[in-house]
Image (spheres, rainbow, N blue to C red):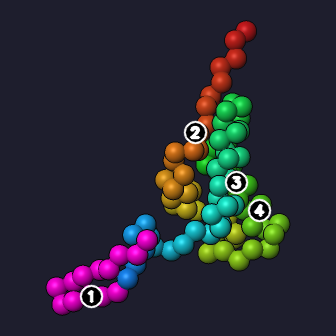
Amino acid sequence: MISVIVTGTGVSGETAIDSKNGPGTVFPTQEEKELTEFLSEMAKRGMGLRSGEFMDLVQNIVVTEKRKTPFTNNRPSYEWYKRFMERNKDIVGLRREVLLEA
């Protein structure tokens, strides 16, 4: 869907209504979906990943597949992690602590 941006001096251009400001995602939409499904499944099983563990996983994918990314040392920053979680907050579960009874 396209909308027209109208300014005080006239039309400045067209942009998609659902577009967001800022840089694009590092992984294509389908790969982000697969990562979120993995995180959700692990959380359901009581083995959710902490932020550092998830960033290690992403770094491993980037290094193994020799991808070019904006990450320093091929490791995503915590800011990237926070934005990823914000983009996918509806389907990603947080790590749950499972108490073991004796």
Residue at 65 percent of width and 67 percent of height: 28
Residue tagged 4: 61
> In the image as oriented, which residue stretches furthest toward the front?
1
Q: What is the span of residues highlighted in magenta in the rendered image?
A: 1-13
Residue at 26 percent of width and 88 percent of height: 11
Residue tagged 1: 11
Tell me if label 3 and label 2 are in contact, CB under 8 Å. no
Residue tagged 2: 94
> Is residue 34 shown left or right of residue 95?
right
Are there few (<14), some (14-19), or many (20+) residues within 10 Å of tag 2? Answer: some
Q: CA distance from mark 3 to mark 2?
A: 16 Å
Q: CA distance from mark 3 to mark 4?
A: 13 Å
Residue type for callout 2: Leu
Sequence order check, earlier mark of 1 and 4: 1
Return the x and y of residue 73 as percentages of the image width and height: 69, 71
Residue type for callout 4: Ile
